[in-house]
């Protein structure tokens, strides 16, 4: 007889330690209450997400940001934290949601009725 398999499911809120959004105030944009949206570099696409990606990419790859991130992971061995300083970018960054400005909540006045 085989052992039963246990499967543990989680969602984006529990996985990141964020509280579940309030349905009456949650952002109805692409972030769905997270305040950020994953975006991969795509210069041909243009638009607001590409502009936000370029800003996030520039900030994420400053040496001061890399040092701050390396020391934030104090549970990692020292060698692994040094590796963070030289890690390569895979093209993905989380950018602030343009609809809510990163708050995860509807802007004052809400969204247009047709959304």
Image (cartoon, rainbow, N blue to C red):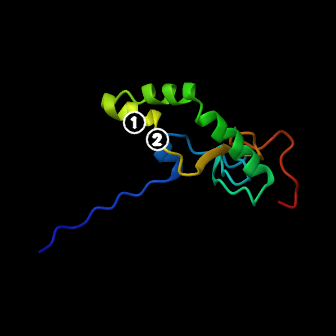
Asked which secondary structure carries label 2, the reply is loop
* Crowd around label 1: few <14 · some 14–19 · many ≥20 (10 Å): few
Residue at numbered disc 1? 83
Left or right: residue 42 compared with residue 81: right
**Whole-percent x, y for residue 41 in the image:** 65, 53
Q: Nearer the viewer, residue 84 or 35?
A: 84
Quadrant (top left/top right/bottom left/bottom right) for the C terminus: bottom right
* Crowd around label 2: few <14 · some 14–19 · many ≥20 (10 Å): few
Asked which secondary structure carries label 1, the reply is helix
Give the residue drawn at x 59%, y 31%. Answer: 62
Residue 111 lies, with reference to residue 4, above or below; the image says above
Give the residue drawn at x 58%, y 51%. Answer: 91
Q: CA distance from mark 1 to mark 2?
A: 6 Å
Q: Nearer the viewer, residue 74 or 13?
A: 74
Q: Quadrant of residue 2?
A: bottom left
**Whole-percent x, y for residue 44 in the image:** 75, 60
Note whether residue 25 is visible: no
Q: Outermost residue toward the bottom?
A: 1
Left or right: residue 81 compared with residue 90: left
Q: Are marks 1 and 2 in contact (CB under 8 Å)?
A: yes
Q: Nearer the viewer, residue 14 or 77?
A: 77
Residue 3 lies, with reference to residue 98, above or below; the image says below
Give the residue drawn at x 49%, y 30%. Answer: 69
Q: Nearer the viewer, residue 96 or 78?
A: 78
Q: Outermost residue toward the left?
A: 1
**Whole-percent x, y for residue 25 in the image:** 73, 44
Residue at numbered disc 2? 87
């Amino acid at each position: 007889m085989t052992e039963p398999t246990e499967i543990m499911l989680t969602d984006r809120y529990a996985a990141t330690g964020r509280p579940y959004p309030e349905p009456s105030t949650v952002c109805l944009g692409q972030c769905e209450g997270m305040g950020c949206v994953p975006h991969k570099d795509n210069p041909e696409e243009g638009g607001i997400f590409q502009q936000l990606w370029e800003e996030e990419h520039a900030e994420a790859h400053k040496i001061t940001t890399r040092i701050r991130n390396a020391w934030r992971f104090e549970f990692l061995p020292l060698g692994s934290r040094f590796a963070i300083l030289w890690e390569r970018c895979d093209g993905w960054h989380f950018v602030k949601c343009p609809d809510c400005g990163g708050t995860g909540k509807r802007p004052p006045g809400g969204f247009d009725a047709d959304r």
